[in-house]
């Protein structure tokens, strides 16, 4: 019986060429490691300042080429060379010289992870370059997202802190002027004009278990009282301005992280600001006339 003869087609020939090319590139990497090992040895023997001259006269290598070959040996040599100095390619059996050079851009730990997660051996030079670019882009985006998340978190903390300060200032407002506790209690029972005009603000205060501030000032004999309250107004306005800037910064960053969550927080902030704007439009509100009991 005649032996079967494989038909020689262009596809078969191309497959053979690609196989030989791939094997040649693998051999090139092993050779580069061997050369890099010897170059490193020679560099330790050559006198200081004569390295470039020795390379040019002895092996016709530039210093940049020698540096790259030594780097390849240092990064791959310990794992690709056995005790006898021969290549065994155990951890990365299919790397070519070009692939090995491109992967030098990654730290050793990241390189091993990248090789484990990607079919590096099956990639062309262009595909590997693109994969490395995509990895760097994803890493930068991840870092940026973490940074923006920290900015967002800090902004929300500042807003919460500013609102807490406003509530503290409201809580410090005297609720019962000296000598007139009955009058204050009567006004509270009758319903303060601000409460009637702005029920949403009242509900907010009640939800936080806060009494409605009357904003009535006690009798003060301090001649600097006006300056004190002017300073307090300026401080509160500065706090609100800072909080608003941080709020808009947080909303901007949140836009790129979660658009729906941003819109939810924006509407909540707008509701609060509308309530504050409506309340401050006319302050203090006019007092209701006392009821005449018959």
Image (cartoon, rainbow, N blue to C red):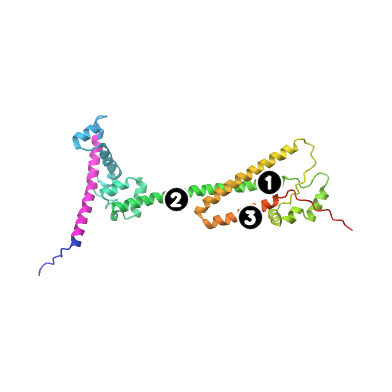
Res. 271 mark: 3
Query: Which residue position is annotated with label 1?
Result: 168
Find numbered disc 1 in the image and state the secondary structure of the residue it sits on: helix
Relative placement, left or right, of 48 versus 289 is left
Residue 64 placement: quadrant = top left
| Span colored in magenta | 13-42
Contact? badges 1 and 2 (CB < 8 Å): no
Residue 35 highlighted magenta (yes or no):
yes
Placement of 243 over or under 63, stated as above or below: below
Residue under the image location 56 percent in, 56 percent down? 263
Q: Earlier in the sequence, mark 3 or mark 2?
A: 2
Q: Residue at x 80, y 52 (%)?
A: 185
User: Distance from label 3 to label 2 (Cα)?
Assistant: 33 Å
**Mark 3 Cα shell of 10 Å, populated few (<14), some (14-19), many (≥20):** few
In this rendering, the answer to whether 65 lies above or below 183 is above
C-beta proximity under 8 Å, tags 3 and 2: no
Nearer the observer: mark 1 or 3; the answer is 3
x and y, in percent, of residue 78 in the image: 28, 44
Q: Of the residues under marks 1 and 2, which one precedes in the sequence?
A: 2
Q: Which mark is residue 183?
A: none
Residue found at the very far left of the displayed protein: 1
Q: Earlier in the sequence, mark 1 or mark 3?
A: 1
Left or right: 179 in relation to 53: right
Q: Give percent across and percent down for residue 200.
A: 69, 56
In the image, residue 142 above or below residue 40: below
Residue ID for mark 2: 142
What secondary structure is the stretch in magenta mostly built from? helix
């Amino acid at each position: 019986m005649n032996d079967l003869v494989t038909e020689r087609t262009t596809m078969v020939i191309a497959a053979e060429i690609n196989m030989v090319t791939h094997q040649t590139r693998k051999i090139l990497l092993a050779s580069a490691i061997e050369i890099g090992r010897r170059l490193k040895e020679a560099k330790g023997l050559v006198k200081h300042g004569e390295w470039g001259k020795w390379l040019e006269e002895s092996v016709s290598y530039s210093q940049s080429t020698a540096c790259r070959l030594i780097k390849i040996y240092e990064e791959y040599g310990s794992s690709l060379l056995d005790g006898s100095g021969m290549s065994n390619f155990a951890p990365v059996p299919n790397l070519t010289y070009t692939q090995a050079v491109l992967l030098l851009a990654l730290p050793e730990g990241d390189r091993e992870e990248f090789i484990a997660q990607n079919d590096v051996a099956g990639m062309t030079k262009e595909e590997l370059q693109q994969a490395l670019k995509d990895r760097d882009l994803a890493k930068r985006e991840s870092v940026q997202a973490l940074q923006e998340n920290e900015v967002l978190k800090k902004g929300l903390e500042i807003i919460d802190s500013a609102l807490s300060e406003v509530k503290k200032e409201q809580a410090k407002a005297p609720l019962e002027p000296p000598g007139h506790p009955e009058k204050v209690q009567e006004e509270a029972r009758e319903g303060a004009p601000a409460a009637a005009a702005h029920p949403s603000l009242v509900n907010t205060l009640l939800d936080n278990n806060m009494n409605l501030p009357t904003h009535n000032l006690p009798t003060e004999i301090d001649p600097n009282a006006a300056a004190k309250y002017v300073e307090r107004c300026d401080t509160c306005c500065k706090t609100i301005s800072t909080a608003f800037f941080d709020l808009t910064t947080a909303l901007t960053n949140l836009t790129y992280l979660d658009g729906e969550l941003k819109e939810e927080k924006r509407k909540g902030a707008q509701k609060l600001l509308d309530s504050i704007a409506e309340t401050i439009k006319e302050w203090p509100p006019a007092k209701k006339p006392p009821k005449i009991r018959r």
